[in-house]
Amino acid sequence: MTVAKTEQLGALRAEAAQAKPRGLWSDAWRRLKKNKAALAGVAYIALLAFIAIFAGLLAPHDPDFIPADALANTPPVWQEGADRRFLLGTDSLSRDILSRLIYGARISLVVGFIPVALELLLGATVGIMSGWLGGRWDNLLMRLVDVVYAFPSLLFFIVVSSALGSTPFGRMLSGLVLLFVAFAITGWVTMARLVRGQVLTLKNKEFIEAARSVGVPTQRIIWRHVIPNSLAPIIVSVTFGIPGYILAEAALSYLGLGIHPPAASWGNMVREFSTLISLNAVFVLMPAALIALTMLAFTFLGDGLRDALDPQMTK
């Protein structure tokens, strides 16, 4: 071997020794960056979150304000008969549609994230207890999961909203609290099953047995080993769950059982404009398109995360 080749080989070995090993999350991020659809979904969700957070600054008008000198059902500015003060027109009460769409983003994101957080808290707790304790406790908790899972979710939402929608509890925060509770009651069972399966897979692994053998407390094992190694499928499940709740809220609001007027909600707006679809279909298309794009963005992100966090994927 020549001196040049020896020096080159030595340089490569030194570079390899200094290189930091890539972990699961760095590899996942590297794969996610290659997924253009997932990145587009992230960009759209970030933009939507920005609009929702700063809705008070971005909205040109108060979403509930009814101007005395404005006409009802004026079209957007690119159509004849528009009012230049209202870029996307006005609704049947002369309220600014653009402002209501902006505030509707806040409702949709809150409805998507809060129930998922409650579902994660309750479902992960039950799943960890069931998978880790095993035996009689596992059987008891899983039978409870089976009972709750037997309830049709959408029908349960409709029954709860119909029964409690007119009560003081049902009107808290324009019906948001009732939606959170109704969604969380039936939504946690899928998360519980997922987490239980992960715990059953991990609890007999060598590193868990090693931690037990040296006397590491159970709580520390769960927090430091079981939960971190279960995060990948949980994150994917959460990402796919958010658009489901957004669509459920829109469907309930369309039926008059979701967010109570005058709060701005995309589902409420579709319901209000459905009577005007023959007059001007753009009124219905604007909130419906936002619902569809939001669900599509979260679906793209969920698909990208599922591929990126798959440990079997090396490319």
Image (tube, rainbow, N blue to C red):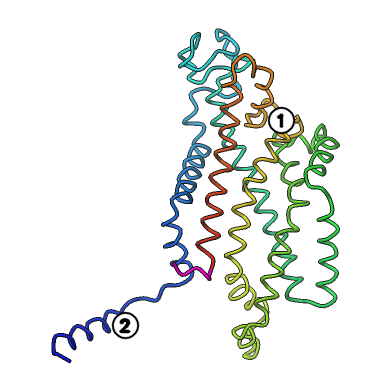
* The N terminus - image quarter: bottom left
Q: Label 2 sits on what residue type? A: Ala
Look at the picture and state if 266 lies above or below 114: above
Secondary structure state at the residue bearing disc 1: helix
In the image, what residue occupies the spot 82% across and 78% down? 135
Look at the picture and state if 75 lies above or below 209: above
Decide which of 194, 311 is in the foreground and name it: 311
Q: Which residues are magenta?
A: 311-315
Q: Is residue 158 magenta?
A: no
Secondary structure state at the residue bearing disc 2: helix
Q: Label 1 sits on what residue type? A: Tyr
Residue 16 place in picture, x, y as percent: 31, 80
Residue 86 place in picture, x, y as percent: 50, 17
Instruction: State left or right for residue 151 relative to residue 24.
Output: right
The image quarter in which residue 220 lies: bottom right
**Picture disc at residue 17:** 2
Q: Residues within 10 Å of mark 1 (few under 14, many from 20)?
A: many
Q: Which residue is mark 1?
A: 254
Mark 1 or mark 2, earlier in chain: 2
Residue 44 place in picture, x, y as percent: 48, 42
In the image, what residue occupies the spot 85% across and 69% down? 140
Decide which of 193, 60 is in the foreground and name it: 193
Look at the picture and state if 169 lies above or below 224: above
Q: Is residue 312 magenta?
A: yes
Q: Residues within 10 Å of mark 2 (few under 14, many from 20)?
A: few
Look at the picture and state if 28 lies above or below 101: below
Q: What is the CA distance from the residue labelled 1 to the residue labelled 2?
A: 61 Å
Instruction: State left or right for residue 45 relative to residue 234.
Output: left
